[in-house]
Amino acid sequence: MTASKPVEPQWGTGIPRWQLALLVGAPIVLGVGAVYLWNRMSPSYRARAANKKGNKYFKAAKYENAIQCFTEAIALCPTEQKSDLSAFYHDRATAYEQQMKWTEVVQDCSQAITHDPRYIKAFLKRAKAHEKLDNKKKCLEDISAVSILEDYQNQESRKLAENMLLQIGYEAIDKHENRGWTMPSPQFIKSYFGSFTDDIISQPLQKGEQKDEDKDNEGEASEVTASHHLSSGYLKAKHYMDEEDYDKIISECTKEVDSEGRYMAEALLLRATFYLLIGNTEAAEPDLDRVINMQEANVKLRANALIKRGSLYKELHQPLLSKQDFNMAAEIDKRNPDVYHHRGQAQSSFAVYTQAYTGNYPSKSRFRIVMKGFEKVIERFPTCAEGYALYAQALTMEKQFGKADKMYDKCIEVEPDNATHYVHKGLLQLQWKRNLDWTSMSELGLDLISKAIEIDNKCVFAYKAMGLIELLRSNHDKAIEMSNKAINLAKSENELGTFYTQREEAYAHRAVFRKYGIRLADRVSF
């Protein structure tokens, strides 16, 4: 009998395996397909698809079609998907930009920034649109945000910021064209006159030395009677000068000039000097011209006028005219030390330094040549603070901060009442003390600049420097306050424009911080 085979157990339902696989796999496939179809039908997917279609139209320069697609994408996109919404608004703004619809660009960029407050491209695009709409301050706000977020590394945004600040500065000059002039502090005036050793008009009136009729080419009359004081505007001006009542000097000199009085040449020179001190160079130059052309006037008056006009030309960037005046002064008054001091022994060395620094000398020898030049200057003029100051600037450019600091100490030693030396030393600390944190560095600088203001509360350079430091520290209100003080003390159009733009930059930074929480102090480094 044949043996029977063992019976295999029947697992499952007895359905063939291929049918079982089909039954199990079908729901999975259907599920994946359903998810795929659902994703394609979801608002997010449809929004991205519309935006993608809009980008194709944009590349084909079909901007109206692109705008329609971007608008559809914005409408479809869920509100919680902020990143997508921000991008869609920016893309539509870009299409509006091609159509030069600047108002729409501003609106869409604003929406993009609302959804992403760090969206640099949206800030930059909106800044350019504000520029087209002549919204200078709005443009400056946006470009300030870009500059802060990019750590001032983007050349395009920096150029736009500089352009806006320049335009704002010009507007400030036009607005303040008829503003009054401000007299510097007594300390500044004394320091200025102290830089002249052979200046007749800066000498106090003396009694009992000479009679008026003995006046000769070496100086003005020394004996002054009460009647002369009453009749001569110039002598009254000299009296006010001795009393440090400087605001009355120009008007009294004008009386002497208008009456063609005995001291007309002196009055013209003194008036011109105070015009220079208050920054009214347009009024100063004609007075200096008249004194220089008075052949009968005291030679020292004419030489002093030439020195001052030469210095003025130097400030106005007219070096040839400046050189001519200093040479003429040296020719007519060879023993006058003021000619050689103000012609700029120290500044000549600084010019040599600048030439060497730009590479006109061999790199290995340029520093040695320049520094030896400065050493000769301070050896020859040990009481010339300007020599030490320019030497310090050269050392700073070569990053020899310790030695530069000592030179500023020498400046302070020679001129302890000159506030600008403290400011320079304070600013040096910001470059030098890199091993300290920014707060510590700025505190060191501010302490020295505060000292400068204690010495001279009209030191415009100190207010400018303090305003800049406070801007870097994101103390916006303090920066604005310091800039306003500098504006009120500005003596020239150039100063006015500079201080005004610094204030507007502080206003812009404050607005950026209040709106978006973006601060320069969180990113600044030295």
Image (cartoon, helix red, strand yellow):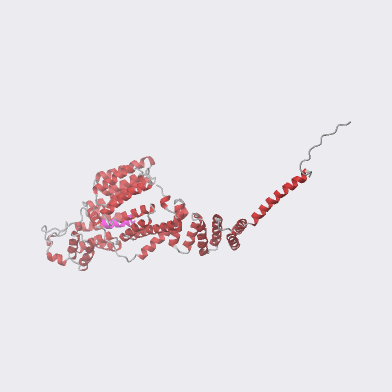
User: Can residue 159 be seen by looking at this rendering?
Assistant: no
Asked if residue 433 lies left or right of residue 328, the reply is right
**Residue located at (15% from left, 66% from top):** 230
Q: Quadrant of residue 17?
A: top right
In this rendering, the answer to whether 256 lies above or below 368 is below
Residue 468: where, in percent of width, then height? 36, 54
Work out which quarter of the rendered image holds the N terminus and state it. Answer: top right
> Which is the main secondary structure of the residues drawn in magenta?
helix
Q: Position of residue 207 (x, y in %)?
A: 12, 59
Magenta stretch bounds: 307-319
Pick whichever, 45 or 277, lies toward us.
Answer: 45
- Total numbered labels placed on residues in the image: 0
Taking 96 as reference, is 507 left or right?
left
Q: Residue 388 in the image: x percent, y percent?
A: 28, 46
At horizontal 22% and vertical 68% (from top left) the residue drawn is: 258
Query: In the depicted view, which residue is nearer to us: 432 or 451?
Result: 451
Asked if one can make out residue 22 in the rendered structure from this viewpoint, the answer is: yes
Q: Residue furthest front?
A: 1
User: Magenta includes 308?
Assistant: yes
> For residue 468: magenta?
no
On the rendered structure, is 462 left or right of 526? Answer: left
